[in-house]
Amino acid sequence: MSLLSREGLKEILQQLECHFTWELQKEHIDPDELEERIAEQIQFLINKSKVQNYNLLAYVKFLNDKKEEALENLQKADEAVPLEYPGDVEKGSLVTWGNCAWVHYHMGNLTESQAYLEKVGSICKQLGSESPYKLELPQIYCEKGWALLKFGARYYEKAKESFAKALEEEPENPEFNLGYAITIYRLEDYYAKKHSGKNSSLEPLRRAVKLNPNDIFVTPLLALKLQDTNRVKEGKKYIEEVLGKYPDVPYVLRYAAKFYRRKGDVETSLQHLKKALSLTPNSGFLHHQIGICYRTQYFALKKKVSKGQFQFVVKQFELLNLCIFHFQKVVERKTKFIYAYIDLANMYVEQQRLPKADETFQKVFAISNLTATEKQQLHFNYGCFQERHRKSEVNAMKQYLAGLKIENGSFEQKKCERSLKQLLHKTVKKGLICVEIFEILGSVSERLGLKEETIEAYEIALKMDPGNEEYLSAFMNLKLSLKN
């Protein structure tokens, strides 16, 4: 093949199956934080694919404008291929070669880029692929699934599709079952769907554990899922089993900690988390979990103090400061982790630092590319802040309404709907009517079943302004629709 032009080369590069064509967007991650997580995985999870991890790390390095380091990691991936795919070195190299072609292209090394492209093309031709530069291989679907999973919640559905495609080809493959089960669990966890029926992650997780009895990731997730479905004793058995095998692996420790915290044993949870943090001191996830533990202890003590047990006041103050310290560490390290910002803002409220809480909420509003569920969580929490601490019913309603208008059937949407309905009902009963409340009532009265409250609001308004034809017309229309 003669040397291609830059434009012609790019056109063919876009046909490859690799990280550069899987639509993994930089704005959806914190590259520094993800780099660190992948490096930790390479260090601690010796049984996980080095090829996949070095490929992903190379791509994230590229996104972080570290092209030379990206090439170094691709070299490590290439060296690991014969060890992981001893009988299929060429097939196992396709994603790595595709990534190499793209990095060299972006560095202006067009000859090197084309050389890697030709290596991919040669293998595709040998194996009779319909596409000159793409092979439909289950292991590539699998690698794509893991990469999508690492890029966060907005990619979970696509990750599920990739693992499902891989399973169509090899339904008994342990790794494909592993990836599929973990993705289903992540989807449930993200959308707060704790069901145990036909579409639950429970059976896929059981199957994955059966096929991967020594896997570090999936066994703790099965334990947590069993806990979700009131099978705590069985879940505890799995947690103790995996802790016995891998007592010094941060991933095992952090999920064990989550299991014990949800079981009510916060002290045991903290022991595991502190041990994990000593191994991976920059982990934002661990700081967040430690903060949650201190928050749990704080609110438990707060109840005791409210009942007159004042000997706990100093300890309560100490726990509040510890909680805020760890949540602050999270947002320093995971700058796009909106739930940590929200947790931090809510704990500033506990310190009566309302301006600081408001400022923290505003930082989240300034983050671009939030998912629908993240936006709803933000609107709900900021609505609660406006209602309970700023004493602004109208601003609170606006936030709940904004969350309600995002149509995705999520748990967060239901929380916004319930809070808006309760606040509108209370406000109308108090007779606190203004133009903005009328607008909100008018937009949601039918959906929330608040027609009677809306009529009552117009009756109050007409007493104050009996000649207002707009109010009178709306009032008559509502009464008519209620009769119908």
Image: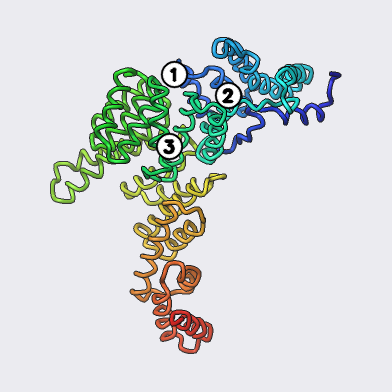
Q: Residue at x 28, y 38 (%)?
A: 262
Residue 246 picture quarter: top left
What is the quadrant of the N terminus in the image?
top right
Residue for point 36% across, 76% down: 431
Give left or right: position of 126 versus 156. right
Amino acid type of the residue tagged 3 in the rendering: Tyr
Q: Position of residue 243 (x, y in %)?
A: 30, 22
Of the residues under marks 1 and 2, which one precedes in the sequence?
A: 1
Q: In the picture, residue 479 is in which quadrant?
A: bottom left
Which residue bears the numbered disc 1? 45
Label 3: which residue? 185
Marks 1 and 2: which is nearer the front?
2
Is 203 placed above or below 117 here?
below
Which residue is the extreme one toward the bottom? Answer: 467
Q: Residues within 10 Å of mark 3 (few under 14, many from 20)?
A: many
Which dot, 3 or 1, sits closer to the camera? 3
426 lies left or right of 100: left
The residue tagged 2 is 139
Q: x, y (%) of residue 152? A: 51, 36
- Give the Cα distance between marks 1 and 2: 19 Å
Residue at 51% across, 31% down: 150
How far across and how far down the image is residue 395, in percent? 44, 62
Q: Is residue 187 above or below residue 136?
A: below
On the picture, is 199 further left or further right than 309? right
Q: Secondary structure at mark 3?
A: helix
Which of the 4 image quadrants contains residue 449?
bottom left
